[in-house]
Image (cartoon, rainbow, N blue to C red):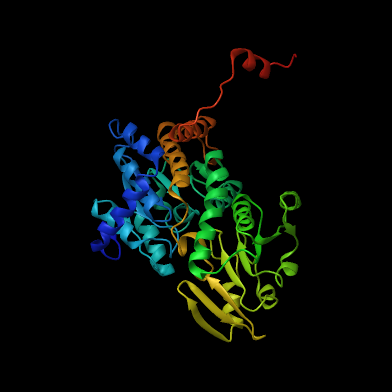
Amino acid sequence: MKTNEIRDIALAPSGRRKIEWVKNNMPLLRGLEAEYSAARPFAGVKISLSVHLEAKTAYLCEVLTAAGADMSVTGSNVLSTQDDVAAALAATGMKVYAYHNATLEEYDRHIEMTLAHKPNIIIDDGGDLVGMLHGKRPDLAEEAWGGCEETTTGIIRLKAMEREGVLKFPMVAVNDADCKHLFDNRYGTGQSVWDSIMHNTNLIVASKTVVVAGYGWCSRGIAMRAAALGASVVVTEIDPVKAIEARMDGFSVMPMAEAAPLGDIFVTATGCIDTVTTEHMLAMKDGAILCNAGHFNVEIDMAGLEKITGEKTESRQNIMGYRLPNGRRIHVIAEGRLVNIAASNGHPAEIMDMSFAVQFLSALYILQNHGKLGKGVIDVSAEIDGLVARRKLAAWGVQIDALTQKQELYLNSWAV
């Protein structure tokens, strides 16, 4: 079995500089590394990880290694792996199977190579590791105690497996932790999506109409940042409660069919297929820009777009232009894949510091409690959420009030 499959080990120095940069801006992970590198609670524990393989993820892998883990690592998107970062990890002796712009066949092979490790703990982002363990390679799940899932899409897949009674081990829903989705999904996605759009297009956002599909936590961040940049924002939704929230937050709300002729920039973040169809695209303005911020490249009907396109040309790096039958041209960023990581650097380091602190502590929870957790999707404990929140405030030098004994008694009593 190969110890790694990467593009070029000579790229390691560049990747190391990136890792050191984010490390200097991730005080929670630094604290966990200092705290657990002596005790090494993960000693002898095999962890297989599939997360967008860039510098923040690499530092999480190094913190887990410092705590004793035997890591086997791959990416979670064919375009999001940064080859210099993968090389930097491989240069430390870590098992790394990933490279940028892999084919789907290569991507699947890398998932399988990562699982050949026969992990005790899985850290997944989108559910591809767990999917392969339950589908093509169930034999590699023999030693699995459980794992952690990073994103909304992965948890949707896990809950479907749980409903069908096929999930073989417990999975912690890291995405649903307050210290993950309230900050990573909203502020991280909101900033990184617009970082990517603005860098790749070199166009102004102010004065444009931005259509945001969905109004979950990721979409809220995208809409909020678009409005702050001066755009008029339209939200499309299927959930009436979320539609009310979007309206009360000051955004126009309408079906995608009505929004399609209005938008200059479209951003999907629903986690569902066919959010933008060819029918919608044919109604769009000449020059409209489309991108996706959901985990999988299924939200924009790229296959349908390819079928109806008369001419396709590269508009800019990471942007493809499509000439429609009606003569109009639309532009798609990053092939309809996750725009903020497939065509940029992903979430800010300080945001991922919180999410990855939750990941580390949830993996530790699996280690300490395996065999007692059943087979299903489990929540991150309030203790972990609270610990990460307190450490984040401490890193900022922020203090907050504490309840007095009298206040605790009042809040826990039914008698006034």
Q: Is residue 412 above or below residue 384?
A: above
Q: Say if residue 39 shows up in the picture.
A: yes
362 and 84: which is toward the camera? 84
x and y, in percent, of residue 390 in the image = 49, 31
Residue at 48% x, 65% y: name it: 199
Residue 252 falls in image quadrant: bottom right
Q: Say if residue 117 shows up in the picture.
A: no
x and y, in percent, of residue 346 in the image = 46, 56
The answer to whether residue 291 is left or right of residue 75 is: right
The answer to whether residue 115 is left or right of residue 381 is: left
Number of callouts: 0
x and y, in percent, of residue 233 in the image = 68, 60
Residue at 38% x, 55% y: name it: 54
Q: Quadrant of the N terminus?
A: bottom left
x and y, in percent, of residue 231 in the image = 65, 61
304 and 342: which is toward the camera? 342
Residue at 75% x, 59% y: name it: 253
365 and 191: which is toward the camera? 191
The answer to whether residue 5 is left or right of residue 285 is: left
Q: Is residue 73 above or below residue 380?
A: below
Q: Quadrant of the C terminus?
A: top right
